[in-house]
Image: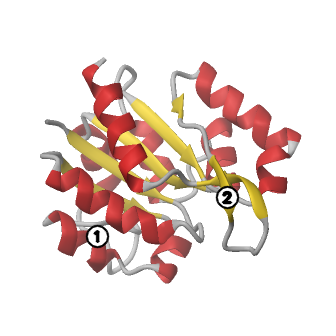
Amino acid sequence: MSQLLLCCGASAALHKGVDLASKLTQAGHRVRAVLTPTAARLVSPQLFEAVTSEPASVVELGPERRGSMDHIELSTWAEAVLVAPATADLISRLALGLGSDLVTTTLLAVPQGIPRMVCPAMNPNMLAHPAVARNLEVLAGDGWRVLETESGHMACGVDGLGRLPEVGVIVEAVAEWLRG
């Protein structure tokens, strides 16, 4: 199995991220989570550490940092990268190559050729926005595999396309993706 870097954005689907980290670990992967600062306000990084037995990271600067260049250490540790849930904001920053937090600086530093998958999760109107569609196309063109969202009831109270796929679906997609 592989060393899988799981990067999580601040989506209402973030609770699935913890379960995803657990299931990927149970499948034999070493999983290290990196959360955006806002995601870490929604779900404690300690939950990710508890289910993976690996450190979870949020910030590179300040008292919570783990090393002198965490983004480099994380990017060279990763044998594959999974961004789930990927918010419209996180997708946009990745498509533009912005490095404004530990998640995005780490992903910018991941060597070319490392497998990358992004799993969008957002309100149907956000997913349908032309800018989000363009940004997903940019990521696909940059070599990212984009996992399709599911349709269903959303945390915002509407039904439609934009749900993060169920954890089992993502775990199976990762297994197929890594098999090549």
Query: In the picture shown, does residue 158 fall above or below 140?
Result: below
Q: Is residue 146 visible?
A: yes
Query: In the picture shown, does residue 82 fall above or below 89?
Result: above
Measured as percent of width and height from the top left, residue 11 is found at 59, 66
Q: Dot 2: few (<14), some (14–19), or many (≥20) neighbours within 10 Å?
A: some
Measured as percent of width and height from the top left, residue 69 is found at 30, 54
Foreground of the two, 102 or 169: 169
Q: Alpha-carbon distance for marks 2 and 1? A: 26 Å
Which amino acid type corresponds to the residue marked 1 in the rendered image? Answer: Phe
* Left or right of residue 91: residue 46: left
Q: Residue at x 50, y 82 (%)?
A: 41
Q: Which image quadrant is residue 125 in?
A: bottom right
* Left or right of residue 169: residue 57: left
Q: On the rendered image, what quadrant is the C terminus found in?
A: top left
Q: Residue at x 43, y 65 (%)?
A: 16
* Left or right of residue 5: residue 28: left
Foreground of the two, 136 or 66: 136
Please tell me the numbered disc located at residue 152. Answer: 2
Which amino acid type corresponds to the residue marked 2 in the rendered image? Answer: Gly
Q: Which image quadrant is residue 109 in?
A: top left
* Left or right of residue 29: residue 97: right
Please tell me the numbered disc located at residue 48. Answer: 1
**Looking at the image, do the residues carrying marks 2 and 1 touch, with CB atoms under 8 Å apart?**
no
Q: Is residue 68 visible?
A: no
Measured as percent of width and height from the top left, residue 67 is found at 23, 62
Q: Earlier in the sequence, mark 2 or mark 1?
A: 1
Measured as percent of width and height from the top left, residue 166 is found at 46, 54
Q: Residue at x 69, y 46 (%)?
A: 92
Query: In the picture shown, does residue 13 fall above or below 24?
Result: below
Q: On the rendered image, what quadrant is the N terminus found in?
A: top left
Q: Which image quadrant is residue 138 in?
A: top right
* Helix, strand or loop under label 2: strand
